Amino acid sequence: MNLENDTFEMEIRQSEPIEAVLSTDTPVQMGDSEEVLLHHPENIEFHTARLPLLLNHDQAEQIGIVEGLRIMGNKLMGKIRLASDDKSQEILQDIKDGIRENLSIGYQVIKAHFDDLGRKIVTKYRVMEVSLVPIPADKNAGIGRTLECVQEKDDFFIRTFKQENTMSENIQSRKEKNIERERASEILSLANHHNKMDLGLEYVESGSSVEEFRSALLSSMESKPLDIQKLSYDLPKEYSVVNALRGIQDVSARGLEWEISQDLEKHQNKSNANAVLLDTRAMVGSSDVVQTSVDSQIQDFLQAKSVIANLPVTRFSGLTADLKIPVGTSASGFTALQTDGTTQASETDITFSSRELSPHRFADVVPLSYGILQSATPDMENFVRRTIANTFAQGYDDQIIGGSGSSGNVRGILNTTGINTVSCGGSDPAFANILSCITEIGADNVDLTKLAFIVNPANLDNLSTAVKYSSTASPLLDMNVVEGGQVGTMMGYPVFATTKISADNYLLGDFSHLAVGEFGGVEISMNPFFDDRRFIQSLNAIFTFDAVAIHPTAFCKLTKA
């Protein structure tokens, strides 16, 4: 389509400009769905500073120009000036007489998406031309867009009423419409799932099949980063856990926190219709009634009692669906070449597997005395947050460290096939045993600078009294208790203590090779009759997460047995 500046080289004398509304954001029916053109400065581009004025979108019938383009109140405005030839002047007289008054824009879609109502929302488009047309579709504009969408080239659209076509030629059968609706719906669903809406719209408009779109989707994702379905909003600093819980019993108290809960419900089904979903990114220990800062990860919510939450694991927060993590391995083909040209380079064989994070649901009951939720002091906000956090922290560690992997439990590190093991042969750990663990991990090409130990508190005395070198003050464990569960260092590596690893068992590893996924929020419902005679109510809480060792060889289990 040739709409370069030279198309305006026609005789346009100082004709009277006519103010006109070129388009608005009124929804217009486009086949089986509606289309909305957004009208803000960031939504619209213009092919040229002055647009050609055509007759019925016919490039051979330019009758003037449109200038003074601007946006006012969700409307695209412009000033029309017609050419000086006889035909254009006749049209000008028709406009003055009120006979011709309807306009249509020709535009190129650059970016669009479908909203929850199934409407196509065009967020970026380029206006190419304006036409005088007989029948408008935009009834609110007065001078508006015309009825029917036709794609001409390169996503260029016009809407034109084709009166000469018969009813049978214009209207598809109900069956054909249903097939087309299903095709478009499936393509757009796949596109939305993989954040490829632009590609999906392209294939819907081109009439391509679902299979063709799947093939294009796979090709476009071959070199892309891992696709993670997760929440995209930032948690407002005004978020209050107490306000969220208060809204369970008092509907009139439901505000921001319940709006966020409703957003979480799009990806997480509630077991109780009257429950609220708490965003796990709410921090512990704020100095105000509401938190003054927000972290995008869950460890701040659980850090009061959890060891795992304070280790540098690979964390995926706010997941809304299963997540497969691709894992690649290879045997190096690095070969030294002889100068005589007799050697041949070996091949590097690359193999791929995957680790999967799937939702595992865990529940607990949190008793609260009468009146706690009626208090709005900073101390009470922090107390309620810590109470909920501590409820899950110990079970969080228990599952991730030693979960069985059956009956709904997470498969913990200690029960993962492929981790290294070292036995102390019935004795308490000695210096040589610790070195063996480090050696086992290092032999698997794991970075030895990022290791950490997890031990049971019952074994701290053994580790503190055992020495590296006989008859010297060189304890295996240098005690130095700090925040986050760390109790000291051993061989220069941090040591964390928790009862969620059984006594006489020790875990060493690079915890960046542990993937932890949290799904949605913490679901909270209220039981006002938990202990009604003592006026104690309870919060019934559900938390959903999973964990998997990405590379099991990055861990080593040391046992006394």
Image (cartoon, rainbow, N blue to C red):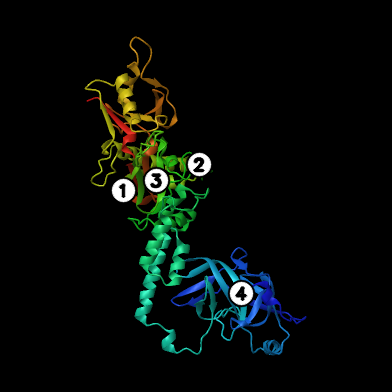
Q: Is residue 110 visible?
A: yes
Q: Which label number is shown at residue 360? A: 1
Mark 1–mark 4 Cα distance, whole angstroms, equals 59 Å
Q: Circle 3 sits in a helix, a strand or a loop, which is it?
A: loop
Q: Nearer the viewer, residue 363 or 160?
A: 160
Is 390 situated left or right of 5 in this image? Answer: left
Q: Nearer the viewer, residue 260 or 320?
A: 320
Q: Earlier in the sequence, mark 3 or mark 4?
A: 4
Going by the numbered disc 4, the residue's amino acid type is Asn
Going by the numbered disc 1, the residue's amino acid type is His
Q: Is residue 116 visible?
A: no
Q: Which label number is shown at residue 378? A: 2
Mark 2 or mark 3, whichever is nearer to me:
2
Q: Farthest front residue?
A: 340
Mark 4 or mark 2, whichever is nearer to me:
4
Q: Nearer the viewer, residue 54 or 416?
A: 54
Image position of 514 with respect to 224: above or below? above
Q: Which label number is shown at residue 81? A: none
Mark 2–mark 3 Cα distance, whole angstroms, equals 18 Å
Q: Circle 4 sits in a helix, a strand or a loop, which is it?
A: loop
Is 1 situated left or right of 260 in this image? Answer: right
Q: Earlier in the sequence, mark 2 or mark 3?
A: 3
Is 176 situated left or right of 7 in this image? Answer: left
Check disc 4 and report the residue beneath it: 2
Pinpoint residue 188: horizontal percent, then vertical percent.
42, 65
Q: Earlier in the sequence, mark 4 or mark 2?
A: 4
Check disc 3 and report the residue beneath it: 370
Q: Earlier in the sequence, mark 3 or mark 1?
A: 1
